[in-house]
Protein backbone atom coordinates (compact mmCIF):
# COMPACT_ATOMS: atom_id res chain seq x y z
CA UNK A 1 0.00 0.00 0.00
CA UNK A 2 1.24 3.50 -0.80
CA UNK A 3 2.01 5.49 2.34
CA UNK A 4 2.46 9.22 2.99
CA UNK A 5 6.21 9.18 2.49
CA UNK A 6 5.83 7.45 -0.87
CA UNK A 7 3.16 9.93 -1.95
CA UNK A 8 5.28 12.98 -1.17
CA UNK A 9 8.40 11.49 -2.72
CA UNK A 10 6.45 10.70 -5.87
CA UNK A 11 5.20 14.26 -6.12
CA UNK A 12 8.67 15.71 -5.75
CA UNK A 13 10.12 13.23 -8.23
CA UNK A 14 7.78 14.47 -10.93
CA UNK A 15 9.48 17.85 -10.78
CA UNK A 16 6.13 19.63 -10.59
CA UNK A 17 6.10 20.15 -6.85
CA UNK A 18 8.74 20.65 -4.21
CA UNK A 19 8.42 19.80 -0.52
CA UNK A 20 9.79 22.36 1.90
CA UNK A 21 11.43 21.32 5.21
CA UNK A 22 8.21 22.33 7.00
CA UNK A 23 6.15 20.01 4.84
CA UNK A 24 4.52 22.71 2.71
CA UNK A 25 4.04 21.84 -0.94
CA UNK A 26 4.89 24.63 -3.38
CA UNK A 27 5.24 24.89 -7.15
CA UNK A 28 8.78 24.27 -8.31
CA UNK A 29 8.65 26.71 -11.25
CA UNK A 30 5.71 29.08 -10.77
CA UNK A 31 5.25 31.77 -13.42
CA UNK A 32 2.42 34.10 -12.49
CA UNK A 33 -0.50 32.40 -10.74
CA UNK A 34 -0.58 28.67 -11.53
CA UNK A 35 -3.70 26.56 -11.76
CA UNK A 36 -4.69 26.01 -8.13
CA UNK A 37 -6.52 23.05 -6.64
CA UNK A 38 -7.83 23.32 -3.08
CA UNK A 39 -8.79 20.34 -0.95
CA UNK A 40 -9.22 19.50 2.73
CA UNK A 41 -5.60 18.62 3.53
CA UNK A 42 -4.11 15.56 5.20
CA UNK A 43 -4.56 12.08 3.79
CA UNK A 44 -7.18 13.18 1.27
CA UNK A 45 -5.03 15.91 -0.28
CA UNK A 46 -2.03 13.60 -0.39
CA UNK A 47 -4.08 10.92 -2.12
CA UNK A 48 -5.50 13.36 -4.66
CA UNK A 49 -2.07 14.76 -5.39
CA UNK A 50 -0.61 11.32 -6.05
CA UNK A 51 -3.56 9.80 -7.90
CA UNK A 52 -4.91 12.81 -9.77
CA UNK A 53 -3.05 16.12 -9.79
CA UNK A 54 0.54 15.06 -10.31
CA UNK A 55 -0.24 12.59 -13.12
CA UNK A 56 -2.48 15.17 -14.83
CA UNK A 57 0.21 17.84 -14.58
CA UNK A 58 2.79 15.48 -16.06
CA UNK A 59 0.46 14.34 -18.84
CA UNK A 60 -0.61 17.85 -19.87
CA UNK A 61 2.58 19.74 -19.09
CA UNK A 62 0.55 21.97 -16.80
CA UNK A 63 1.55 23.43 -13.46
CA UNK A 64 -0.75 22.54 -10.57
CA UNK A 65 -0.53 24.13 -7.15
CA UNK A 66 -2.10 22.05 -4.36
CA UNK A 67 -3.40 24.03 -1.37
CA UNK A 68 -5.59 23.41 1.68
CA UNK A 69 -7.87 23.53 3.57
CA UNK A 70 -11.16 24.08 1.78
CA UNK A 71 -13.14 27.06 3.07
CA UNK A 72 -16.66 27.70 1.81
CA UNK A 73 -16.54 31.26 3.10
CA UNK A 74 -13.36 31.90 1.15
CA UNK A 75 -14.81 30.51 -2.08
CA UNK A 76 -17.78 32.84 -1.70
CA UNK A 77 -15.59 35.84 -0.86
CA UNK A 78 -13.27 35.19 -3.82
CA UNK A 79 -16.11 35.06 -6.30
CA UNK A 80 -17.92 38.09 -4.90
CA UNK A 81 -14.70 40.11 -4.98
CA UNK A 82 -13.93 38.95 -8.54
CA UNK A 83 -10.59 37.72 -7.24
CA UNK A 84 -10.71 33.94 -7.67
CA UNK A 85 -7.51 32.24 -6.49
CA UNK A 86 -8.77 28.64 -6.41
CA UNK A 87 -9.69 27.15 -9.76
CA UNK A 88 -10.94 23.75 -8.61
CA UNK A 89 -12.15 22.97 -5.09
CA UNK A 90 -12.96 19.74 -3.26
CA UNK A 91 -16.11 20.31 -1.23
CA UNK A 92 -18.72 18.42 0.71
CA UNK A 93 -21.47 17.65 -1.78
CA UNK A 94 -24.01 19.84 0.02
CA UNK A 95 -21.99 22.86 -1.11
CA UNK A 96 -22.86 22.00 -4.72
CA UNK A 97 -26.42 23.05 -3.97
CA UNK A 98 -25.58 25.96 -1.70
CA UNK A 99 -23.04 27.29 -4.20
CA UNK A 100 -25.51 26.84 -7.03
CA UNK A 101 -28.18 28.79 -5.19
CA UNK A 102 -25.69 31.53 -4.30
CA UNK A 103 -24.57 31.84 -7.93
CA UNK A 104 -20.89 31.31 -7.12
CA UNK A 105 -20.15 28.15 -9.13
CA UNK A 106 -19.56 27.46 -12.80
CA UNK A 107 -21.88 24.82 -14.27
CA UNK A 108 -20.03 21.66 -15.22
CA UNK A 109 -19.26 21.68 -18.94
CA UNK A 110 -20.06 18.12 -19.95
CA UNK A 111 -18.77 18.77 -23.46
CA UNK A 112 -15.33 18.76 -21.79
CA UNK A 113 -16.03 16.53 -18.79
CA UNK A 114 -16.53 13.04 -20.21
CA UNK A 115 -18.85 11.46 -17.67
CA UNK A 116 -21.13 9.09 -19.58
CA UNK A 117 -19.46 6.14 -17.84
CA UNK A 118 -20.13 7.56 -14.37
CA UNK A 119 -23.19 6.46 -12.42
CA UNK A 120 -25.89 9.17 -12.24
CA UNK A 121 -25.58 9.82 -8.49
CA UNK A 122 -21.98 10.96 -8.93
CA UNK A 123 -22.59 13.79 -11.41
CA UNK A 124 -24.65 16.94 -10.99
CA UNK A 125 -25.11 20.22 -12.82
CA UNK A 126 -22.60 22.09 -10.66
CA UNK A 127 -20.30 19.41 -9.28
CA UNK A 128 -18.81 15.98 -9.90
CA UNK A 129 -17.93 13.42 -7.23
CA UNK A 130 -14.45 11.98 -7.50
CA UNK A 131 -13.84 9.70 -4.50
CA UNK A 132 -15.69 8.15 -1.59
CA UNK A 133 -15.13 8.06 2.14
CA UNK A 134 -17.11 8.07 5.35
CA UNK A 135 -17.66 9.73 8.68
CA UNK A 136 -17.09 6.89 11.11
CA UNK A 137 -16.89 5.90 14.74
CA UNK A 138 -13.19 6.03 15.62
CA UNK A 139 -11.69 5.03 18.94
CA UNK A 140 -8.55 4.68 21.02
CA UNK A 141 -7.43 1.05 20.94
CA UNK A 142 -5.98 1.20 24.47
CA UNK A 143 -9.41 2.20 25.81
CA UNK A 144 -11.28 -0.29 23.62
CA UNK A 145 -9.05 -3.25 22.63
CA UNK A 146 -10.08 -6.08 20.33
CA UNK A 147 -13.38 -7.59 21.40
CA UNK A 148 -14.53 -4.46 23.20
CA UNK A 149 -14.78 -2.05 20.27
CA UNK A 150 -17.84 0.18 19.75
CA UNK A 151 -20.00 -1.05 16.90
CA UNK A 152 -22.70 1.61 16.50
CA UNK A 153 -23.69 5.19 17.20
CA UNK A 154 -25.79 3.78 20.04
CA UNK A 155 -22.47 2.58 21.55
CA UNK A 156 -21.00 6.05 20.99
CA UNK A 157 -23.83 7.52 23.07
CA UNK A 158 -23.48 4.77 25.73
CA UNK A 159 -20.92 6.31 28.09
CA UNK A 160 -21.74 3.83 30.85
CA UNK A 161 -20.50 0.77 28.94
CA UNK A 162 -18.06 2.71 26.74
CA UNK A 163 -16.61 5.34 29.10
CA UNK A 164 -14.50 8.33 28.22
CA UNK A 165 -14.61 11.74 26.61
CA UNK A 166 -16.03 12.17 23.12
CA UNK A 167 -15.34 14.44 20.15
CA UNK A 168 -17.84 15.45 17.46
CA UNK A 169 -17.73 17.66 14.39
CA UNK A 170 -18.54 21.33 14.91
CA UNK A 171 -21.22 21.38 12.21
CA UNK A 172 -24.77 20.02 12.27
CA UNK A 173 -24.18 17.67 9.36
CA UNK A 174 -22.83 14.21 10.24
CA UNK A 175 -24.12 14.86 13.77
CA UNK A 176 -27.71 14.83 12.51
CA UNK A 177 -27.21 11.43 10.88
CA UNK A 178 -25.24 9.96 13.81
CA UNK A 179 -27.77 11.18 16.39
CA UNK A 180 -30.74 9.70 14.55
CA UNK A 181 -28.98 6.35 14.23
CA UNK A 182 -28.20 6.50 17.97
CA UNK A 183 -31.90 7.18 18.56
CA UNK A 184 -32.79 4.02 16.65
CA UNK A 185 -33.93 5.53 13.35
CA UNK A 186 -33.25 3.00 10.54
CA UNK A 187 -30.58 4.03 8.03
CA UNK A 188 -33.08 4.22 5.19
CA UNK A 189 -35.35 6.56 7.17
CA UNK A 190 -32.78 9.22 8.10
CA UNK A 191 -33.93 11.22 5.06
CA UNK A 192 -35.90 13.24 4.20
CA UNK A 193 -34.73 15.58 6.95
CA UNK A 194 -38.02 16.82 8.35
CA UNK A 195 -38.24 19.38 11.14
CA UNK A 196 -39.41 16.57 13.42
CA UNK A 197 -36.30 14.50 12.68
CA UNK A 198 -33.96 17.45 13.14
CA UNK A 199 -35.59 18.20 16.50
CA UNK A 200 -35.14 14.53 17.46
CA UNK A 201 -31.47 14.68 16.49
CA UNK A 202 -30.92 17.88 18.47
CA UNK A 203 -32.51 16.30 21.56
CA UNK A 204 -30.27 13.25 21.19
CA UNK A 205 -27.20 15.46 20.79
CA UNK A 206 -28.15 17.27 23.99
CA UNK A 207 -27.78 13.91 25.78
CA UNK A 208 -24.19 13.38 24.66
CA UNK A 209 -23.12 17.04 24.80
CA UNK A 210 -21.83 16.92 28.44
CA UNK A 211 -19.36 14.24 27.35
CA UNK A 212 -18.13 16.04 24.22
CA UNK A 213 -14.93 17.79 25.24
CA UNK A 214 -13.91 18.86 21.73
CA UNK A 215 -16.09 19.97 18.81
CA UNK A 216 -13.51 19.60 16.08
CA UNK A 217 -13.19 21.81 13.02
CA UNK A 218 -10.24 20.22 11.15
CA UNK A 219 -9.93 16.61 10.03
CA UNK A 220 -6.52 16.23 11.66
CA UNK A 221 -7.96 16.74 15.14
CA UNK A 222 -9.78 13.42 15.79
CA UNK A 223 -6.78 11.11 15.22
CA UNK A 224 -4.62 13.42 17.32
CA UNK A 225 -7.16 13.57 20.15
CA UNK A 226 -7.60 9.81 20.05
CA UNK A 227 -3.92 8.94 19.87
CA UNK A 228 -3.10 11.04 22.96
CA UNK A 229 -6.05 9.66 24.89
CA UNK A 230 -7.65 13.07 25.31
CA UNK A 231 -10.83 11.43 24.03
CA UNK A 232 -11.64 7.73 23.76
CA UNK A 233 -14.11 7.99 20.88
CA UNK A 234 -14.70 10.45 18.03
CA UNK A 235 -16.65 11.00 14.87
CA UNK A 236 -13.92 11.16 12.25
CA UNK A 237 -13.21 11.01 8.53
CA UNK A 238 -12.20 7.49 7.54
CA UNK A 239 -9.17 8.57 5.52
CA UNK A 240 -7.69 10.45 8.47
CA UNK A 241 -8.05 7.40 10.68
CA UNK A 242 -6.57 5.06 8.07
CA UNK A 243 -3.62 7.43 7.80
CA UNK A 244 -3.09 7.36 11.57
CA UNK A 245 -3.39 3.58 11.65
CA UNK A 246 -0.69 3.26 8.98
CA UNK A 247 1.58 5.39 11.14
CA UNK A 248 1.08 3.10 14.13
CA UNK A 249 -1.09 5.36 16.27
CA UNK A 250 -3.28 3.59 18.87
CA UNK A 251 -6.47 4.33 16.93
CA UNK A 252 -8.93 2.32 14.91
CA UNK A 253 -12.42 2.63 13.44
CA UNK A 254 -15.40 0.68 12.19
CA UNK A 255 -17.41 0.97 8.99
CA UNK A 256 -20.43 -0.34 10.89
CA UNK A 257 -23.01 2.46 11.09
CA UNK A 258 -20.80 4.62 8.85
CA UNK A 259 -22.06 7.75 7.14
CA UNK A 260 -20.89 7.20 3.55
CA UNK A 261 -20.24 10.24 1.36
CA UNK A 262 -18.46 11.39 -1.76
CA UNK A 263 -15.89 14.13 -2.29
CA UNK A 264 -17.14 16.59 -4.90
CA UNK A 265 -15.22 18.92 -7.22
CA UNK A 266 -16.65 22.34 -8.03
CA UNK A 267 -15.34 25.23 -10.13
CA UNK A 268 -15.61 28.73 -8.63
CA UNK A 269 -17.36 31.21 -10.91
CA UNK A 270 -14.96 33.55 -12.67
CA UNK A 271 -11.82 31.40 -12.60
CA UNK A 272 -9.45 32.24 -15.47
CA UNK A 273 -8.77 28.49 -15.75
CA UNK A 274 -12.35 27.34 -16.31
CA UNK A 275 -11.63 25.02 -19.25
CA UNK A 276 -8.54 23.56 -17.61
CA UNK A 277 -10.57 22.87 -14.46
CA UNK A 278 -13.07 20.94 -16.57
CA UNK A 279 -10.21 18.97 -18.16
CA UNK A 280 -8.91 18.06 -14.71
CA UNK A 281 -12.33 16.80 -13.61
CA UNK A 282 -12.64 14.73 -16.78
CA UNK A 283 -9.23 13.18 -16.14
CA UNK A 284 -9.94 12.50 -12.46
CA UNK A 285 -13.02 10.38 -13.25
CA UNK A 286 -11.23 8.36 -15.92
CA UNK A 287 -10.57 4.65 -15.38
CA UNK A 288 -6.83 5.36 -15.27
CA UNK A 289 -7.03 7.96 -12.51
CA UNK A 290 -9.77 6.24 -10.51
CA UNK A 291 -7.77 3.02 -10.60
CA UNK A 292 -4.92 4.70 -8.71
CA UNK A 293 -7.16 5.10 -5.66
CA UNK A 294 -7.47 1.35 -5.20
CA UNK A 295 -3.89 0.50 -4.09
CA UNK A 296 -3.58 3.73 -2.06
CA UNK A 297 -6.55 2.52 -0.05
CA UNK A 298 -7.41 5.73 1.78
CA UNK A 299 -10.45 6.85 -0.21
CA UNK A 300 -12.41 4.70 -2.65
CA UNK A 301 -13.21 5.36 -6.32
CA UNK A 302 -16.61 6.55 -7.52
CA UNK A 303 -16.15 4.64 -10.75
CA UNK A 304 -17.58 1.14 -10.39
CA UNK A 305 -15.21 -0.32 -12.97
CA UNK A 306 -12.26 0.87 -10.90
CA UNK A 307 -13.69 -0.42 -7.63
CA UNK A 308 -14.19 -3.80 -9.29
CA UNK A 309 -10.42 -4.19 -9.64
CA UNK A 310 -9.93 -4.21 -5.86
CA UNK A 311 -8.69 -7.33 -4.14
CA UNK A 312 -10.64 -8.70 -1.18
CA UNK A 313 -8.21 -7.02 1.20
CA UNK A 314 -8.41 -3.68 -0.63
CA UNK A 315 -12.22 -3.82 -0.66
CA UNK A 316 -12.21 -3.82 3.14
CA UNK A 317 -11.13 -0.19 3.02
CA UNK A 318 -13.89 0.98 0.67
CA UNK A 319 -17.02 2.17 2.42
CA UNK A 320 -19.08 1.63 -0.73
CA UNK A 321 -18.11 -2.06 -0.93
CA UNK A 322 -21.25 -4.17 -0.30
CA UNK A 323 -19.82 -5.71 2.89
CA UNK A 324 -19.28 -2.24 4.35
CA UNK A 325 -22.20 -0.35 2.86
CA UNK A 326 -24.97 -2.65 4.08
CA UNK A 327 -25.29 -0.89 7.47
CA UNK A 328 -24.33 2.60 6.31
CA UNK A 329 -26.30 5.79 5.94
CA UNK A 330 -25.78 7.02 2.39
CA UNK A 331 -25.26 10.76 2.81
CA UNK A 332 -27.84 12.79 0.87
CA UNK A 333 -26.14 16.06 0.00
CA UNK A 334 -29.23 17.80 -1.30
CA UNK A 335 -31.13 17.03 1.91
CA UNK A 336 -28.12 18.10 3.98
CA UNK A 337 -27.94 21.44 2.17
CA UNK A 338 -31.59 22.06 3.05
CA UNK A 339 -31.45 21.19 6.75
CA UNK A 340 -28.06 22.81 7.26
CA UNK A 341 -29.28 26.12 5.86
CA UNK A 342 -32.57 26.00 7.80
CA UNK A 343 -31.18 24.94 11.15
CA UNK A 344 -27.69 26.51 11.19
CA UNK A 345 -28.65 29.38 13.52
CA UNK A 346 -30.27 26.96 15.96
CA UNK A 347 -27.17 24.74 15.80
CA UNK A 348 -24.85 27.62 16.70
CA UNK A 349 -27.06 28.43 19.71
CA UNK A 350 -26.86 24.78 20.75
CA UNK A 351 -23.05 24.86 20.68
CA UNK A 352 -22.90 28.05 22.74
CA UNK A 353 -25.47 27.02 25.33
Image (spheres, rainbow, N blue to C red):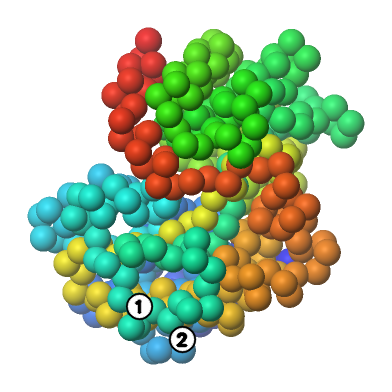
Q: Going 69% across and 23% down the picture, which residue do you hit?
A: 154
Judge depth for marks 2 and 1 and give the one in front.
Answer: 1
Q: Is residue 235 above or below residue 3?
A: above
Horizontal and vertical percent position of residue 147: 89, 31
Residue 330, x across and y down, in percent: 58, 46
Q: Is residue 216 left or right of residue 287?
A: left
Q: CA distance from mark 2 to mark 1?
A: 23 Å
Residue nearest the observer in this picture, 324 or 190: 190
Looking at the picture, does residue 301 appear above or below residue 182?
below
Q: Which residue is mark 1?
A: 110
The reply, left or right, for residue 174 in relation to residue 309 is: left
Residue 13: quadrant of the picture: bottom right
Q: Are marks 2 and 1 in contact (CB under 8 Å)?
A: no
Residue displayed at 67% across by 53% down: 319
Residue 107 picture location, percent across and down: 27, 67
In the rendered image, is residue 228 in sight? no
- Describe the element under mark 2 as helix, strand or loop: helix
The residue labelled by disc 2 is: 58
Q: Kindly identify the residue that appears in the image at 46 percent across and 89 percent down.
A: 59
Amino acid sequence: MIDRRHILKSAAALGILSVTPGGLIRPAHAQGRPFTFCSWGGALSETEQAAFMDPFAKLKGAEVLNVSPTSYAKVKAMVEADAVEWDLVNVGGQFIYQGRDAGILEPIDYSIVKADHLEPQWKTEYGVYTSTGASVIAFNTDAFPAGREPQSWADFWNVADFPGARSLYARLYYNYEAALRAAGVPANEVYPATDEKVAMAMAKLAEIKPHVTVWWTAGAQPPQLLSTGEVTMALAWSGRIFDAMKEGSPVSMTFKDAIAWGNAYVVPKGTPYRELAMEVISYVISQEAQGRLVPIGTYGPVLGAAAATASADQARFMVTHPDNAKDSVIYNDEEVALYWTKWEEEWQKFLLA
